[in-house]
Structures are given as structure tokens and as C-alpha cells.
Image: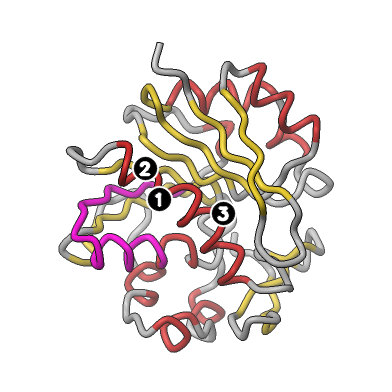
Amino acid sequence: MNADVRLLITADGSHTAINQTLDKTYHSIHGAYQESQRVYIELGLLEAFNRFADHPLYVFEMGFGTGLNALLTAQQALIHQRPVVYTAIEAYPMALDDTKQLNYDNFLGTDFLASLHQSPWNSPVSINPYFSLLKIHSQLQNWSPSDAFHLVYYDAFAPTAQPELWEPEIFAKLAHLLLPNGLLTTYCSKSYVQRNLRLAGLIVEKHPGPPHKRDILRAVRPAS
């Protein structure tokens, strides 16, 4: 089943979508690009490039959604010429007709968005010479991965909409997927989210967020 969405231009000129079933946006209305760039690229991907300089980078995204986080990652992989193996899970994908209306390629000067959305589910594909994508059509709770990851983008809908995705058991599962010194980044900095990340054995860091967002989180799996 596809998500029931309506597109919206955010304050920085980039699109987001409103999931009309949950009445929640996929990205901040104050700037979809600015939020993704700060939370997932600056705090996550670029730091992971530094920490794991000698390895292809394995990235997992919870919530493929509009494809913006994957698109930005594919762009950075090409710019830095760093191989990225990207796995994303999504239970309710956007319809292709809706994704064709997104303005990200024009906004960013890229040409990957259609390939990201049109690529088959549950089968790896190469998007550019440095970025491969595997989209999993499933709920996170029902997925049993075989890979370990250097970086997790945690981009589920807000706890008010999907509280089951912010519980200690979910973060314990994700912590188990992370390699030593691996990172998890998320836009949600609520105190119980911090607590649940710590219960999973992760070290939690608070960082300044994008516009209109005071704090965001980066959690680190200890080396030992």
C-alpha cells in the first residue's frame, strides 16, 4: 500500500510531503533540505567518512520516504568519491506519481531522484559509481538484517505518530546493527528518546539543530 501524501514547499524552497493518514510531514516545514543536510549529512555522513576513512561506508536509513536523505547521500558519495552501500526500509512507500513531483533534483542540481524511487524493492541497484541502494519494503519490527552498518539515519515519523518506533527494543535492535564507533543520528531529541538510546548501550550527544530546531542527537556505539 502506498502512502497517502500531499506535497508542500518548505521555507528553504525544497519540498516535503504530508502523510495525510498520520497528519505528519516527512521533513521540517522550516526547511526540508536544511534539516536533512544538518541531521543526516553533517552530523552523520561526513563524520562517518572521517571515522571510517578506509572502508566502503554501510548506511541504514529508517524511513525512505521522499528519498531526500538517500539523494543527499548519493550526491556526497560522488563528490567525495567514497563508496556508500545504502539500505533503506519503508513500510508505506510514496506512489511514483507523487515522487515525480518532488523538486529535489532541480533544487540540488542532481539527477538521481527518479532512479532512487523507480529502483526495485528488495534488490540492490547501482545509482552512481559510488552509491548502491537496497530498498526493503517492510516494517522495521519485522526485518531481520544480515549486515552491520557504520551509520544509521533514524528518520521515523515523530513519536506522537509512531510511538512504537521509539521504544527501547527498537534502539537495542539498531545498536546491535552498528559497528564499533558507529553512529546513529536523528532529529528527535526528546528526553525519553535520549534515555532509550542510552538503555541500548549508546553514548548520546546533543548537537545544535537546523533552523527552528534547538537540539538534535547523535548516538555512538562504544568501541568496546
| Secondary structure of residue under mark 3 | helix
Foreground: 193 or 18?
193
Query: In the rendering, at what x and y percent does residue 54 appear?
Result: 17, 38
Residue type, label 2: Ala
In the figure, 203 relative to 97: above or below?
Answer: above
Crowd rating for badge 3 (residues with CA inside 10 Å; few <14, some 14–19, many 20+): many
Q: Quadrant of the N terminus?
A: bottom right
Residue type, label 1: Leu
Residue type, label 3: Val
Q: Which residue is mark 2?
A: 48
| Secondary structure of residue under mark 2 | helix
Q: Which region shows up in magenta?
A: 72-88
Q: Which residue is mark 3?
A: 39
Cβ atoms at labels 2 and 1 below 8 Å apart:
yes
Residue 74 lies in the magenta stretch: yes
The residue that appears at 42% across and 61% down in the rendered structure is: 70
